[in-house]
Image (spheres, grey):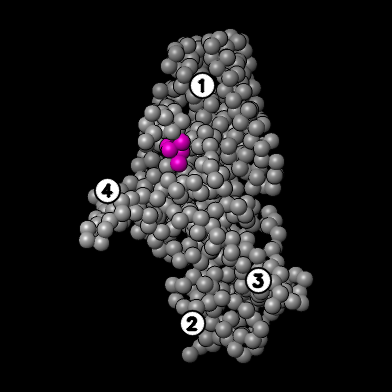
Amino acid sequence: MSERRVELEVLRYHPETDAAPRFQRYSVDCREEWVVLDALNHVKETLDPTLSYRWSCHMAVCGSCGMMINGEPRLACKSFLRDYQGVIRVEPLAHFPIERDLVTVIDDFMAKLKRVKPYLIPAQARALEQGEYRQTPAELKRYKQFTLCMNCMLCYAACPEYGLIPKFIGPAAISLAHRYNQDSRDGGRAARQEEIAAAEGVWECSFTGACSEVCPEHVDPAAALQQVKIKSTVDWYLAHLMPWLKK
Amino acid sequence: MAQSSKPIVWGPFAAGGTLTAFLTPALMVLTLLAALGYTPDLLAYERLHAFAGSWLAKLALAGTVFLTLWSAAHRLRITCYDLGVRADTLVATLLYSAALAGTAAAALYLSRI
Amino acid sequence: MSRKPYLREETMRWVFRHPRYLRYMAREFSCLFIGGYGLLMVWGLKRLSEGPAAWRSFLEVLQSPASIAFHVLALGFALYHSVTWFKLTPKALPVQVGGEFLPDGIISGAHYAVWAALSLAVLILAGAF
């Protein structure tokens, strides 16, 4: 099997000793077919056991190993070494505080995710003996694409508006809210609108579209956010110009 | 948290973005032809004056001016923020006011035609 | 274990991090030219309301080199705005027919076709040819 020597430039930060992050260069012999995550694992096993980063599945399912690779938010397990030339620069996901090395603090995202109520709030509660909630294939199709989000946060690292306005609820959380709003069994839209139609919600999005370009699961958050904007605008005009329609 | 009243400014932005996407390039070609000395028939004084004399055309022209200026103002507001200008309230007030003032001026001139 | 999260400052560097951000900026800068053209329309309406002589002098100003340069540049940005706007329309307004979503290309393509027909109609009705 062919090998290649890879130069990695990894952002290091040790809160106990470092005032600010710094780059460290590693030179590692890698297999041709490896991904960046393999190279990091190899560094940790053979060169530097102090290197910290998150990963779990190694197959683009868990969404843990998101990092900036040559300035672009990517899953390290989905980034093949053979696609890069020269030094590969690895940094923690942009816009998130750095806990240690490539590990970021994700509390902000977790709190926002909770706020948008990303779970089914049944429109009509059913007793067990009434059977299951039924849905046609067309109704499933309406939201299926938005279920694919694995919370990897690459879209937050790609979104300039999230970087500029940290209060912005952001692409993934709003897309997940939209996923439940689009579900025929759900009745929780009014509750979610309190968050996603607020000033810090969808309105901070300027439709850069970067979120959809970096999404490893092709969720297309940018599409979800524009749909939320249009629906919220229709809501607002109906409520203010035709208040008699209000239920 | 309360639902935002951002739709007031976003609604005309989206409408204006759509209108300018469909219409503005063709309008620019018309005035560009005039600029190059090949003035289209419509831009001759008598024809344009007669055209702008009808109520329907007045309404369409005022609407086009409003949506064009508003969508540009809204985009410029966001661009200012993107470029690091943090006085968003001031920028928004100035730009939206300018769009409204331009529309009012256009309406005034149209009323004199 | 002591925690001391480090937040890197957000600078304007993001604009140059990837070509997509430059494309986004170009799209947003189209507003300067489209807005400028809106102001030109207001100015034109003013001159039109002031009589034939004023309108004639407006047409003369239009023929100045600065105006020609503005028009060429503005037309470029306006076309870019139209192309990007219609390209993104299917994301904002997806159409589901019989369960399946229409492909983006069909929705964008329909918009491009209407745009072309409308532009042609405006140019013909205005006697540009």
Chain under disc 3:
A
Checking the image for residue C97, the label placed there is 4
Name the element at disc 2.
Answer: loop
Do labels 4 and 2 touch, CB within 8 Å?
no
Q: CA distance from mark 2 to mark 3?
A: 30 Å
| Mark 3 lies on residue | A99
Which region shows up in magenta?
Answer: A232-236
Residue occupying image coordinates x 60% and y 28%: B99
| Mark 2 lies on residue | A33
Do labels 2 and 3 touch, CB within 8 Å?
no
Q: Is residue B102 above or below residue A238?
A: above
**Magenta: main secondary structure:** helix
| Mark 1 lies on residue | B62
Q: Residues within 10 Å of mark 2 (few under 14, many from 20)?
A: few
The amino acid at mark 4 is Val
A46 horizontally vs A129: left or right: right
Q: Residues within 10 Å of mark 1 (few under 14, many from 20)?
A: many
Q: Position of residue A204 (x, y in %)?
A: 56, 47
Q: Are marks 4 and 2 on the same chain?
A: no
Chain under disc 4:
C
Residue occupying image coordinates x 59% and y 89%: A45
The amino acid at mark 1 is Ala
Residue B57, quarter of the rendered image: top left
Q: Nearer the viewer, residue C77 or A95?
A: A95
Q: Position of residue A203 (x, y in %)?
A: 54, 45
Q: Residues within 10 Å of mark 4 (few under 14, many from 20)?
A: few
Q: CA distance from mark 4 to mark 2?
A: 42 Å
Residue occupying image coordinates x 35% and y 59%: A144
Residue A41, quarter of the rendered image: bottom right
Of circles 4 and 2, the one toward us is 4
Q: Nearer the viewer, residue B43 or A129?
A: A129
